[in-house]
Image: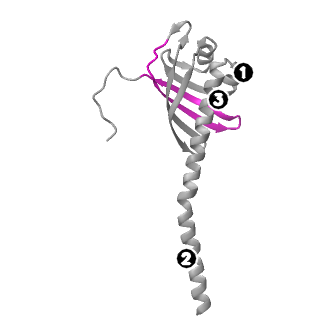
């Protein structure tokens, strides 16, 4: 009887410890995704700024698609844009990274000084960006990139 009680107590303790550690594991996974997402994004921007085309080509998935000031573009067109990109000093901030299996969805804000595409100066208003990355047999590759320009004015208060 006493042995049975001790076994039950041990089993309950194991379950309780397991339940208590689950939030810690989830928090570590979330932190890991956050760190990984920021790292990928920062490297992506460094490669575009330095025009490291071989790194950009390796990073872009064959099924890549982007939308921004140049419209909707595929992988080849985006690489052409990067080749003709003049990217001044920039900052990346307000990262939010979500992970689902081998996919990272990364949103962030950019502030860029002196950005030009094909010699056309771009707006210096800080746009939001949204990137989708996939970890596959080639490593982390970007599937999609969106440049989301801020609205001219908005009375919406979405932070409720």
The residue under label 2 is 12
Q: Main secondary structure of the magenta part?
A: strand
Callout in the foreground (3, 1): 3
- Going by the picture, which residue comes out furthest to the left? 155
Spatial distance from mark 3 to mark 1, Cα to Cα? Answer: 13 Å
Q: Secondary structure at mark 2?
A: helix
- Can residue 62 be seen in the rendering of this structure? no
Per the rendered image, the range of residues in magenta is 122-149
Q: Does the residue at mark 3 contact the one at mark 1 (Cβ under 8 Å)? A: no
- Can residue 24 be seen in the rendering of this structure? yes
Q: Which mark is residue 54?
A: 1
The image shows residue 118 at horizontal and vertical percentages of: 56, 8
Mark 2 and mark 3 lie on one chain; the one further toward the N terminus is 2
Residue depicted at 53% across the width and 35% down the height: 106
The residue under label 3 is 43
Mark 3 and mark 1 lie on one chain; the one further toward the N terminus is 3
């Amino acid at each position: 009887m006493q042995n049975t009680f001790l076994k039950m107590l041990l089993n309950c303790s194991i379950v309780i410890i397991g339940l208590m550690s689950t939030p810690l594991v989830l928090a570590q996974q979330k932190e890991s995704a956050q760190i990984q997402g920021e790292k990928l994004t920062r490297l992506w921007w460094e490669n575009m700024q330095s025009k490291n085309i071989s790194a950009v080509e390796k990073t872009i998935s064959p099924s890549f698609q982007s939308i921004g000031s140049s419209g909707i573009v595929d992988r080849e067109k985006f690489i052409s844009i990067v080749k003709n990109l003049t990217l001044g000093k920039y900052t990346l901030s307000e990262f939010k990274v979500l992970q689902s299996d081998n996919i990272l969805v990364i949103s962030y804000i950019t502030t860029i000084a002196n950005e030009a595409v094909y010699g056309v100066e771009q707006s210096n208003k800080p746009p939001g960006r949204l990137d989708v990355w996939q970890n596959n047999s080639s490593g982390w590759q970007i599937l999609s990139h969106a440049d989301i320009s801020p609205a001219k004015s908005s009375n919406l208060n979405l932070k409720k």
